[in-house]
Image (cartoon, rainbow, N blue to C red):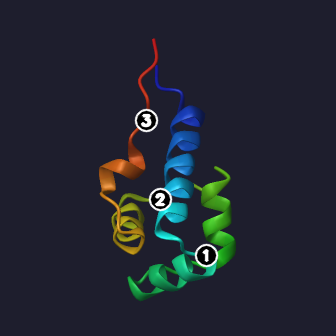
Amino acid sequence: MIDTNAVRDAVASNIRAARARAQLSQTQVAEGMREHGCKWHFQTVGAVERSKRPVAAEELIALAEVLGAAPDALWRVPLTG
């Protein structure tokens, strides 16, 4: 069985790390997401990074572009077991 909380936490951690590497503020990420047609605000970025809001597939693709990251680097989840 998939632990959805663990998946969401891993994705959130990957997004935080990618934003740090890109040296972008939450506001800058939100602006980039809006340029891709997503209705994001800095609060949305914060909620995603705290695992409080899921990320849709199309948002993940746009987010990867904004962060200069490969999409699979954002959704990669460590295997356990």
Sooner in the amino-acid sequence: mark 2 or mark 3: 2
In the image, residue 79 above or below residue 47: above
Secondary structure state at the residue bearing disc 2: helix
For residue 5, which quarter of the picture? Answer: top right
Q: Which residue in the rendered view is the most extreme toward the top? A: 81
| Front-most of residues 1 and 62 | 62
- Residue 77 is labelled as 3
Report, in whole angstroms, how far the alpha carbon at label 2 lies from the one at label 1. 11 Å
Residue position for label 1: 25
Look at 55% across and 82% down and name the residue there.
28
Secondary structure state at the residue bearing disc 1: loop
Q: Residue 52: where, in percent of width, then height? A: 67, 53
Q: For the residues carrying marks 1 and 3, which lies nearer the camera in this image? A: 1
Look at 36% across and 71% down and name the residue there.
62
Name the amino acid, label 1.
Answer: Ser
Compared across the picture, whether 39 is left or right of 47 comes to left
Name the amino acid, label 2.
Answer: Ala
Look at 42% across and 69% down and name the residue there.
67
Sooner in the amino-acid sequence: mark 1 or mark 3: 1
For residue 20, which quarter of the picture? Answer: bottom right
Q: Residue 53: where, in percent of width, then height? A: 62, 57
Whether residues under marks 1 and 3 lie with C-beta atoms below 8 angstroms apart, the answer is no
Sooner in the amino-acid sequence: mark 2 or mark 1: 2
In the rendered image, the quadrant that contains the C terminus is: top left
Tag 1: Cα neighbours inside 10 Å, few (<14), some, or many (≥20)? few
Q: Residue 60: where, in percent of width, then height? A: 40, 61
Compared across the picture, whether 14 is left or right of 71 comes to right
Residue position for label 2: 18
Name the amino acid, label 3.
Answer: Val
